[in-house]
Image: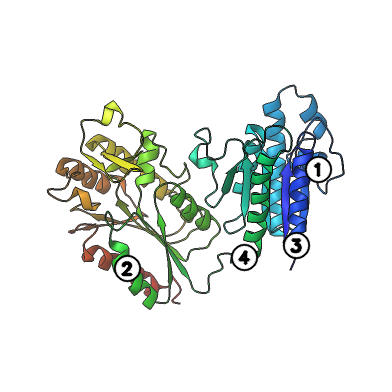
Amino acid sequence: MTKTILLIGTYDTKDDELRYVARRIVAMGGAVMRMDVSVLGDPSQPTEITKADVARAGGSDIETAMTCGDENTAMQIMARGAATMSAELCAKGEIHGMLALGGTMGTDLALDCAQALPMGVPKYVVSTVAFSPLIPPDRLSPDIQMILWAGGLYGLNAVCKSSLSQAAGAVLGAAQAVEPPRATRPVIGMTSLGSSCLKYMTHLRAPLEERGFEVAVFHATGMGGMAFEALAAQGYFAATMDFALPELANLMVGSVAHAGRGRLTRAGALGIPQIVAPGCTDLIDFAGWQDIPDAYADRPFHAHNRLIQSSALSPDERRTLVRDIAQRLSRASGPVHMLMPTHGVEEWDRPGGPAHDPDGLAAMVEEMQTAITAPVELTMLDCHINDPAFATAALGVLDAWLCDGTLTRP
């Protein structure tokens, strides 16, 4: 089957570059559907999707975009339309991947298009600001691929052709090779960190598979949480074991290692059964290349590696975080069971560890008993989150749901 790539760009200012990419894709055996998101000018050749089509899909019209007098307003009209049409084309099976080209304006629009497409659909952006600090983490779709458009600000040249040709090959190759996430067994979505910090997945995976489930574990360091939430929003999980929530702590204090404001909401919105625990919610993750802010410099500290370093939350901050978690869970339309291990929530907070803080843990335990209210169930566990007893308790909740029909037995 010939794979069709949606090729997005401003065909008035980047016509040569977009035509070059289209030729490369076709030469490799693919097909192209061109979407023009320009505002003022016209392409040298007609495109399958015109700028007027895009503006209408954005709830406006191209005349309004052209005469509004503000390029940001105009491009947001086009971004809404481009994202809407991208999702519709994908749902109809008319496209099998997306490739967008742009500077800051085109990248801004392309990020919306990428987020509109489901996980597993190849999405590539050739950008002059690829993975730049200008791009906030929550604008990135979890499986987006970006390549720097080196030398590509204006016109074709040997340098930018290198980036463009790589992108053409990458998106078509991905569309031809991808196995979209189509589960053959019910899937348990689980969050965790590396096994040096959180170990429950080593106790849980085999028993869950014995019960007929497939287990997908997501690394809760920002992009992993985004992927987890994206699949939850697609209804991909039969149930979730969301046991690692450091991304919420990071969001609360302004760290870049977060998964957006929708974390811990998508499964609940669809009524997917959730077993939750506050794994690693005692720490804040900072980029390893940054200095720890002065406000956190005198707290317990752990340098995990050259990418991540962590400082501790204060007891009051932990209480605030627990209340935030409780509020998010209270909006769930399906069953939710919170497990609170009272001996600790990550490996380094054990006695003698660099993050050991009995006062902070006590504050978390106390606040959990106040903030978590019905219909969310709460079980206090006389163990550490990394003890086998925690995994046993989680399996007990799951087995009870299998027995009472909350979950269908595989």
Residue 368: percent from the left, percent from the top? 27, 47
Rendering quarter of residue 283:
top left
Rendering quarter of residue 218:
bottom left
Disc marking residue 204:
2
Q: Which residue is mark 4?
A: 177
Quarter of the image for the N terminus: give it. bottom right
Closest to the camera, between mark 4 and mark 2, is: 4
Q: CA distance from mark 4 to mark 1?
A: 31 Å
**What residue sits 26% from the left and 38% below the top?**
313
Q: CA distance from mark 3 to mark 1?
A: 27 Å
Q: Secondary structure at mark 2?
A: helix
Q: CA distance from mark 1 to mark 2?
A: 50 Å
Closest to the camera, between mark 3 and mark 1, is: 3
What is the crowding at mark 2: few (fewer than 14 residues within 10 Å), some, or many (at least 20)? some
Whether residue 256 is visible, yes or no, is yes
Disc marking residue 29:
3
Q: Secondary structure at mark 3?
A: loop
**What residue sits 48% from the left and 63% below the top?**
237
The reply to whether callout 1 and callout 2 are in contact (CB within 8 Å) is no
- Amino acid type at circle 4 is Ala
> Position of 54 compared to 305: left or right?
right
**What residue sits 30% from the left and 51% below the top?**
278
Disc marking residue 53:
1
